[in-house]
Image (cartoon, rainbow, N blue to C red):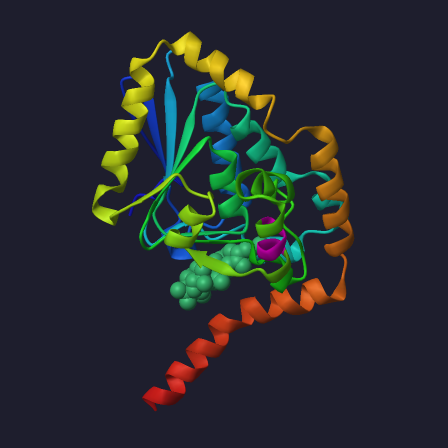
């Protein structure tokens, strides 16, 4: 069997569609996925003919966060390397507009990935949230500055302190997504939007994005603050306990199923 690439890439005229393709793990961001996205972003950033990039997920998730098995192993030095934050910073700084076509779970780093895009369209089944606090860590890939920029500090505090997961209707109501569409129309709507952008003068669009970047938070100081706080949390016993509990679910479910069948 041929191994499927982690990132499927389709190009029509100047528009890229990138599909994160690790559906069995709900497209969670492991190092290989991070590397694949870096490579795609580097290529797109250096290509003057690119007009827009659409990101979506294969299967029932957009991205269910960073890979918890890998997060479990990361220590304070890894947090300071800002693995996911660095990726999302590069995405946010891509000179052309980006559209997150959110087809399902957008949790943790997945919600942060969607927020690092310029525009967000979601299906009715999409779910959003920053559940990190339940795992003994915090949103540290831009969540503490991109979420308040979109939904306001009050709502951002509620979502970041509780880890609550919200549906697409609620996400649209608070300004986290631009619009909600039926699942069958998601990619058509995203392509139409991308084509609309691609019909405009490319340089004028790039300049508009650069000007808007002056109003969007990010940059080394905010990234460093998040990474330093996360470095402390990455060493806490509670992080290990909570992540071990998540990872043990698979074994528990298999044991329960076997017991039911016997
Ligand atoms: N990292 C690693 N693996 C993940 C993952 C993540 N963030 N999210 C889901 N997966 C894996 C599951 O472990 C499972 O793998 P398995 O079949 O080998 O056991 C597979 O993806 C399917 O997920 P599952 O939990 O069985 O689906 P569900 O429909 O019961 O629940 C979620 C869906 C999204 C609610 C649940 O997967 C979840 O809570 N994921 C973690 C979300 C999160 O906390 N993200 C932030 C991380 S910082």
Q: Is residue 151 visible?
A: yes
- Find out whether residue 159 is within the magenta segment: yes
Query: Secondary structure of the magenta portion, mostly?
Result: helix
> What x and y, as percent, mark residue 26?
41, 54
State the count of labels. Answer: 0
The answer to whether residue 146 is magenta is no
The region drawn magenta spans 156-160
Tell me if residue 251 comes above or below residue 47 in the rendering.
below
Residue 5 lies, with reference to residue 242, above or below; the image says above
Quick check: can you spot residue 47?
no
Residue 178, horizontal then vertical, whole percent = 39, 38
Residue lying furthest bottom in this view?
Answer: 262
The C terminus, quarter of image? bottom left
Identify the residue shown where x is 64% and y is 67%: 242
Q: Residue at the location (46% across, 43% down)? A: 175
Vertical side of 68 occupied by 58: above or below:
above
Question: Is 202 left, or right, of 13 in this rendering?
Answer: right
> Picture coordinates of residue 182 (x, y %)?
24, 48
Residue 224 on image: x %, y %: 74, 36
200 to the left or right of 113: left
């Amino acid at each position: 069997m041929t191994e499927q690439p982690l990132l499927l890439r389709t190009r029509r005229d100047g528009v890229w569609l990138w599909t994160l393709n690790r559906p069995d793990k709900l497209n969670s961001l492991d190092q290989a996925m991070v590397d694949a996205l870096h490579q795609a972003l580097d290529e797109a950033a250096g290509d003057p003919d690119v007009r827009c990039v659409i990101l979506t997920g294969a299967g029932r998730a957009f991205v269910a966060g960073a890979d918890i098995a890998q997060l479990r192993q990361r220590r304070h030095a890894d947090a300071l390397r800002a693995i996911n934050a660095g990726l999302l910073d590069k995405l946010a700084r891509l000179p052309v507009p980006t559209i997150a076509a959110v087809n399902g779970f957008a949790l943790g780093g997945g919600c942060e990935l969607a927020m690092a895009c310029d525009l967000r369209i979601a299906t009715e089944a999409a779910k959003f949230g920053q559940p990190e606090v339940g795992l003994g860590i915090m949103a540290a890939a831009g969540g503490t500055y991109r979420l308040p920029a979109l939904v306001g500090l009050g709502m951002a505090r509620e979502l970041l302190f509780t880890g609550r997961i919200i549906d697409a209707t609620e996400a649209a109501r608070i300004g986290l997504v631009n619009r909600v569409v039926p699942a069958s129309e998601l990619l058509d709507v995203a392509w139409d939007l991308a084509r609309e952008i691609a019909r405009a003068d490319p340089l004028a669009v790039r300049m508009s994005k650069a000007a808007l970047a002056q109003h969007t938070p990010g940059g080394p100081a905010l990234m460093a603050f998040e990474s330093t706080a996360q470095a402390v949390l990455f060493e806490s016993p509670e992080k290990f306990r909570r992540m071990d509990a998540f990872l043990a679910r698979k074994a528990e479910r298999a044991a329960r199923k076997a017991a039911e069948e016997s």
